[in-house]
Image (cartoon, rainbow, N blue to C red):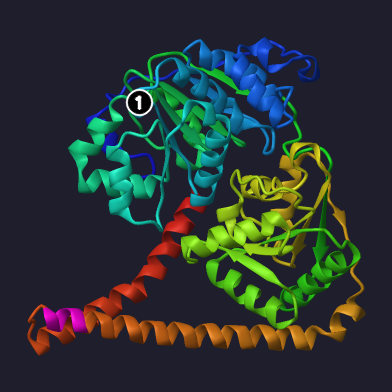
Amino acid sequence: MLILNCLALTFECRSFYYVLHTTTFMEHSCVNFRDIGITTWLTKQLEELNLRHPTPVQINCIPKILDGSDVLGCAKTGTGKTLAFVLPILQQLSSDPFGIFALILTPTRELAFQIGDQFNALGRQLNLKCSIIVGGRHQMAQAQELVRRPHIVIATPGRLADHLQSDQLGIARLLSTIRFLVLDEADRLLDPAYALQRQTLLFSATITDALDKLHQLSIRKPYFFEEKDQIQTVKGLEQSFVLCPHTFIDAYLVYIVKEFYTSRESSSILVFVKTCRECQTLALMFKKLGFEVGSLHSEVLQSLRMSSLARFRSGRIRIMICTDVAARGLDIPHVDLVVNHNVPRCPKSYLHRVGRSARAGRFGAAVTFVTQHDVLLLRSIEQVIGEKMEQIQVPHHEVTLYAAKVLATKREAEIRLENQDNNSDDRKENWRRKELILQGMDDKLIEKEISRWKDNRKSKPILRRKKQKKRLNK
């Protein structure tokens, strides 16, 4: 489960009701951070970062958090939801800096590091200790960090579950002192959770059925803030689509990316794809076609993911191909164009993807490739965003001029990945066989164990696809 049932050792379950707060908030351009209760030392830190006026989600949520209320905040991407909980947590921490003060749970590793950067930037006067507990890093080193009781723990649920399973009582004891539990991108994270003497803060860009189950969390009535704008995508975002045959979608993709890339010298492009495999394939294809690109998906080593993200943020590479791992909460500056290689099956996934562009008032564009099979999905997205997307008329004859080259290059990339997989499987099998031999296992038993191991590896992708279908059908 995403939110850890193991926390029941520390927190008892209570009922949670939510109240829709209907008070009209002040025009945020007239309000400063002192007006909503932020202390002088923090406002000075914010001014150094050129942040002088809070956003609506900050105006409405920060005072309630400082008053001790549980809060559920829902606002569009790029509206400052992270600062809405970072600021009050730091302010409360400054008056009582003892033990693990706050636990922030977030769905992706990159988002965990990004939140950590904001805590460290604003909390340096407190000599803040912040620990990032995510996969892809050494678990023993992380356990030692937790034992030293950092002020802030930012974790992905899977890795925190690993720590709880390895030392259930010890980790639960360390977490027993937390004053704040924050679920960032709560609609992805929320499952039955547990509460005692601490505030619960939930922030997301979208409200889902899971968030309606908040009665399982707390007897205290939380403050509920939701931006009232009916259009759920941000202003300044131009949304359009390209209608194309399924077999030529990659040729159309290269055409659009190339046109945008060459006509805007400093522009950056984020391409979203459906699967890790497609992400790897398209990254190799673009590199073969002469583009410098990065890739971001769950099967890339954490160090390489962070390196790609840093290069893209700094402008050293201008094209990033990624799965939905990058669609949640990441503040990637200057994303001029978001490209959807596929139409997301869930409109809320579309909102999170295109939310990477036109953030914090900047201008941006989003282009979605629509095949003959995706028209109904496009219509459902248009219903959610409250507007019709403009169709881009791509000259088909220009695309066909280099379609053959694109398709051939992609096939080369697919073959290369298949060869890498075969070599990787052989290495893993040899390593497993050596491990069993060192254990003194009989030859016949070794062969049985290797056969079982191979069957398990083959069944994992099938089980993963079944789980994805179940989630989509809910």
Q: Residues within 10 Å of mark 1 (few under 14, many from 20)?
A: many
For the point 70% across and 55% down, which residue is it?
314
Answer with left or right where residue 461 lies relative to residue 79: left
Answer with left or right where residue 353 lies relative to residue 197: right
For the point 27% across and 24% down, which residue is it?
12
For badge 1, the amino acid type reads Ile
Q: Position of residue 272 (x, y in %)?
A: 66, 60
Q: Position of residue 245 (x, y in %)?
A: 77, 74
For the point 35% across and 87% down, which residue is it?
426
Residue 309 in which image quadrant:
bottom right
- Do we see residue 227 in this rendering? no
Residue 195 in which image quadrant:
top left
Examine the rendered structure and indicate whether residue 315 appears above or below residue 361: below
Answer with left or right where residue 438 lies relative to residue 199: left
Magenta segment = 434-438
Answer with left or right where residue 338 lies relative to residue 414: right
Q: Main secondary structure of the magenta part?
A: helix
Residue toward you, 449 or 56: 56
For the point 54% across and 26% down, which residue is it?
85
- Do we see residue 58 in this rendering? yes
Residue toward you, 428 or 239: 428
SS of the residue under disc 1: loop
Is 216 in the magenta?
A: no
Check the picture and name the quadrant holding the N terminus: top left
Location of mark 1 (residue)? 178
Q: Position of residue 149 (x, y in %)?
A: 32, 33
Is 436 in the magenta?
A: yes
